[in-house]
Image (tube, rainbow, N blue to C red):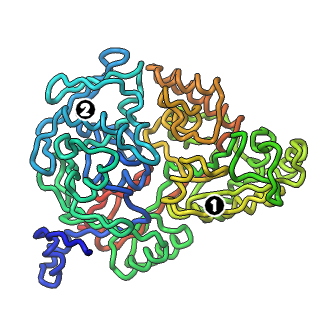
Amino acid sequence: MKLIFPLRPLALAVLLGAFVPGAALAQNLTIGVRAGPDSIDPHFTATGTHAEALKHVFDTLTWSGDKLQIEPRLATSWKAIEPAVWEFKLRPGVKFHDGSDFTAEDVKFSIERIPTVAGPNPTTIYVRRVKEVKIIDPLTVHIVTDGPAPNLPNDFIRLFIVSHKAAAGLTKDNANEAFNSGKAAVGTGPYKYVSWTPKDQLVLERFDGYWGPKEPWARVVRKELPNDAARLAQLKAGQVDLITRVPATDVATLKRDPKLAVATIETVYVFNIELDLRDKPPQVSAKDGSPLPKNPIQDPRVREAIDLAIDRPALAEIAMEGLGSPVNQLVTPTIAGYNKSLPPLKPDLAKAKKLLEEAGYPNGFRVTFSFTSDRLPGDRQVGTSIAQMLARIGIDAQANAQPASVFFPARSRGELSMAMSGWGTLTGEANYTLSSVVHSNDPAKKLGAFNVLGYVNPVIDKLIEDAGIEMDEAKRNDLLAQANAIVAKDRPRLPIVAVGSAWAMQKDKVTIAPRIDEDTLAMDIKPVK
């Protein structure tokens, strides 16, 4: 049975485009994106493309600026009034899309619902420090934490606020249905939800009651075009105004096209490989497929050998065609807690082979090497190239490129023994990354949620936990830098390259202000005057 939804007046006008004056059509923006949301519930997953899409509909308590600086959003100010209590003052006069008032009740409700509805890549990492939410008055909340929490305002850049009325009573079983239908998709953002067809397009319309600046676009369509060639073709044909994640191979050609403009930036996303340190890895074997007596990756010499086999400058220059840069840690240089003393990582095949021999694997072994194929620019090319590099030292890394929608659930279930994806330090400080991906998986402490492959180091755990409660910024950054040094030595994850990103657009219609978190927001796209 085909579902038919009533058309709003604006949507009807667009369908009758031949009869709409040019000025009205100019207010429409169509973006070709590589991937879209996984639901319309903003609390469902922490995946970057999911959050990017839903920032149009739902505001966050704090906002991450174009250089990741923390800015006011639904909260106008915040301060720690006690070691474990933050006070947030809320913006007055804000309306939800249904006309109801935004109040402290919605903040409390949003924080408390996240643990009950979060799916894969859980959004619980953004509220893990919260112990209690106290409503002081309609525009003031006190957030009681499980100890000093200096990074709470940073975490709240991903605290999406939903209406406590529209989303009342929803559970993990029915929340997605309610949001996807539009019934619960009531936010305070600059755009209202119109419709969403999974893996196809998200349609939005301007919310004229928005508390912030009025947006120039009356209607925004985010078309999912995971195939790079298809995105380029639609741009050249004028079917979209702007496309994201332009393949590096096409950047130079597009720059020469007089009808198009290209914008590039180096992002905070880092391709990194996570290695299986469990006793019985599901995807590691001898080259003939027979089981090994023990997991070779548990041996630090094997992890170092893998590290030394990877030529990061070649990956940045060739596999990414210059749209990336080599890295030596899980965070990029602009991130608080970055360790400036760590040396560049250089390949050394002779030493790598010697280490494998010393570890008892002179002929290597077999491992399935999984990586995303459609999430970040160059992921497929980088993954394929790394598999070839590992072959040079005798490791049969069987390349397994997967769509993100398949990769991340499998990864969360612990089914992958060697996996590469991109991780962005979106809050601007290293504790966000280290506490999520290298701290031991400790549900009681709400730490290590993305560490599913068995890495445990009590020393690094303590550094991360100490940094998480250290209110002195210089001391906190030193603790994080020490932790980054231990990660570099232990190698539970191998940082590979920082991801560059490119956008291409119709030169005579739009311009964009690129963000280093790679978010493509209609709010940053302006019509050419």
Name the residue beneath numbered marker 1: 382
Counting from the top left corner in percent of width and height, residue 380 is at 59, 64
Tell me what residue is drawn at x 10 percent, y 70 percent.
9
* Quarter holding residue 74: top left
Q: Is residue 234 left or right of residue 429?
A: left
In the rendered view of the protein, which quadrant contains the C terminus? bottom left
**Dot 1, crowdedness within 10 Å: few (<14), some or many (≥20)?**
many
Q: In this orientation, does residue 237 appear?
A: yes
Front residue of 520 and 408: 408
Front residue of 394 and 178: 178
Q: In this orientation, does residue 378 appear?
A: no
Single out the mark in the foreground, 2 or 1. 2
Q: Looking at numbered disc 2 in the image, what kind of residue is underneath it?
A: Lys
Name the residue beneath numbered marker 2: 108
Counting from the top left corner in percent of width and height, residue 357 is at 90, 47
* Quarter holding residue 527: bottom left
User: Between marks 2 and 1, how big is the CA–CA gap?
Assistant: 42 Å
Whether residue 268 is situated above or below residue 154 in the rendered picture:
below
The tag earlier along the polypeptide, 2 or 1, is 2
Q: Looking at numbered disc 1 in the image, what kind of residue is underneath it?
A: Val
Asked whether the residues under the numbered discs 2 and 1 touch, taking CB atoms below 8 Å apart as contact, a structural biologist would say: no
